[in-house]
Image: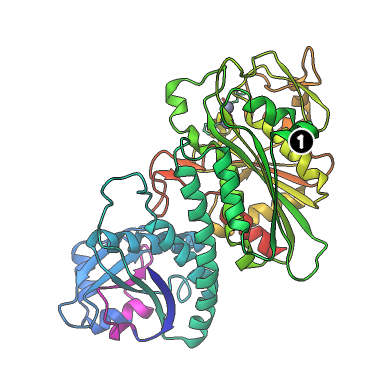
Amino acid sequence: MVISARKGDLTQQSCEMLVVNIFFGAKGLRGATGTVNGALRGDLEKFMKEDSFKAKLGATFLMRTNGKIPAKRVLVVGLGKKEEFDLEAVRQAAAASLNVAKGLGVKSVVSILHGAEAGGLKASECAQAMVEGVRLAQYNFDKYRSSKKEKSEVQRFDIVSHQGQDVRQATLGVLLGERMARGTLFARDLVNTPAQDMYPEKLVETAKQIVKGKGSLRIRVHDRFTLTRMGAGGLLGVAKGSDHPPYLVHMVYKPKKATKKRVAIVGKAVTFDSGGLSLKPADSMMTMKCDMAGAAAVLGVFSVIADMAPACEVHGIFGAVENMPSGKAIRPGDVLTVMNKKTIEVLNTDAEGRLTLADTLTYANKQKPQAIIDLATLTGACMVALGEEITGLMSNNDELSSKLLEASASVGEKMWRLPLEKNYRKLLKSEVADMQNIGARWGGALTAGLFLEEFVDKTPWAHLDIAGPAYAEREIDPYTRKGATGHGVRTLLSYLKSL
Ligand code: BES
Ligand code: ZN
Ligand code: ZN
C-alpha cells in the first residue's frame, strides 16, 4: 500500500472509495463533507438521515455514488464528539475507513485530512496520525498460516486536500507516520513470532541485522563468557533452566552531529516465561511469548532510528533469556549475585524479569546516560491496577515522567504514573540476602518498580510496566487487533525526537 498526501478536488477523484467525516451530533454537513454532499445533490445527507447514522467515533456510513462523482463510493466516518476530539480520534477514524476498504476488497482510497479543517489540529500531526492508524490497521500476522488470506489489499491511500499549505505539512506528517508505524510493526512481528522461533539467539541476530550497513549504528553482544566475567548473575541465573544461552545486547545510535545528550532504553527480553520451577498455570502461560515485548519495542525503535535521526545519542540494551524449569534451573531459595554485587534471594522463579533487569539496568547505568527508560512486561499486578490498555509508569524523576506522559499522549499510547512508595521498600527485605525478588501480597507493580530502582543509582529513570498493553487478548480499537501491539515504540520515538 502506498500512502501519499496531495492537492486535489474531492469531487473529482476517481477511486473506489472516497472518505469524508462528520462529528457526532453535527447539524448539517460542512466543509469538505458538505462539498461532496453538494456534488451528490444532497443524497449523502438524505441517506444518512434516513438510516439515522450516529457519528460515534469510528462508526461508518457507506453509499454508492451512481456516477454522480467519479468516486465509486463515499464513506462517512464518525469523529465522535467535538469536545472529545483529538489526534487519537483521527488515528481511529482513519483506521476505521481502512478496515471498511479491506472488508470490501477496495483497492484505491482517497480520504480527506481528518481533523485539520473543523478539528483545528495541525495538518502535519493529523496526517501522521492517519498514516499510523491506516498502517497499523492494515497489519496482519499470517507467517504461520498455510493459506494466506488473499483478500485483495488496499493498494493506494491518498490524503487529499484543496489547501496547498495543508498538503505540504501533511507530506511531512506522512513521512513521520510511516516511520512510527514501521517501528511499531517491526515490534509486533517479533512478539507475535512463537517462542520456538524467537529465542535469545534470534533476538541477537535481529539486532545485528538492524545495525548492518547503518553508519550511525553500532552493536556489542555479550555472551555467557563475558556475562560471567561481568558478574551478570541475574541473566545467568534465569537462563540456567533453558537450553538457550543468555545474551546481553548493546546497540548504540550516534547522530552525525556531536551531542552531549545520551539516553538508554532498556527492554525486558524473556523470550518465553514458563515461570521456571515456580511454574505458571497453563492459562497464564498461553501468551508468554510476549515476555520479550520490552526488547521488541527497543528493537522497533532501532529499526527506524537511523532514518528518523534524532539529535541525541541512544543506547538500546536488553538481556535475552528464556525462563524454563529443568534439573539445572534456579530454585526458590537460591541466592544470585547480580552485576552491581548485590545479592538477591529468589523466592519465586516467576519473578524473573526483575532479575534480568537488575543486570541490564546496572549495565545501562554504566554507560552514564542522562536518562534510562526501561520497558518490561513485568507484573500481572500492573494489569490488575490499570487493565489491559494502560501502561504503569514509575519514575524517580518528575521531568522525565512528564516528558514521557506527553509523548505517550501524542501517539495515543495510554500511560499512568504509579508511585515508588519508599515505605514499601521494607517488603523486599530478605532473611538471608540483600534483597528478595518478591514483595508481599499487595502492590506488586510497585514493589517490582522499587526493586528495579536499586540498580539505577540517582540517574533519572522511568520504568514502563507494559504487561497489559503489550499484547492484546481481544480487539482494543480499530488499529489494535488481537495479538502483539508494538506498544511503547511510538512513545519512545516521539520522546527521542523531542530531545
Ligand atoms: N511475565 C510476567 C508478567 C506478566 C503477566 C506479563 C501477564 C504479561 C502478562 C512476570 O515475569 C511474572 O510472572 N510476574 C509475576 C511476579 C510475581 C511472581 C511476584 C506476576 O505478576 O505474577
Ligand atoms: Zn515470570
Ligand atoms: Zn516474565
Query: Which residue: 60% across, 45% down?
Result: 204
User: Regarding mark 1 in the picture, which secondary structure is present there?
Assistant: helix
For label 1, the residue is 453
Can residue 121 be seen here? The reply is: no
Residue 411: say if magenta: no
Which of the 4 image quadrants contains residue 365?
A: top right
The image shows residue 73, relative to residue 465, as above or below, that is: below
Q: Colour scheme in the image?
A: rainbow
What kind of residue is marked 1? Glu
Measured as percent of width and height from the top left, residue 65 is found at 19, 76
Residue 159 seen in render: yes
Taking the spot 39% from the left edge, 44% from the top edge, the residue there is 482
Q: What is the magenta range?
A: 10-34
In the figure, is residue 108 to the left or right of 127?
Answer: left
Q: Is residue 23 magenta?
A: yes
In the rendered view of the protein, which quadrant contains the N terminus? bottom left
In the current view of this chain or complex, which residue is farthest to the front? Answer: 225
Q: Residue furthest left?
A: 66
Q: Is residue 145 above or below residue 448?
A: below
Which residue corresponds to the image point at 18% horizontal and 83% vertical from the top-left? 68
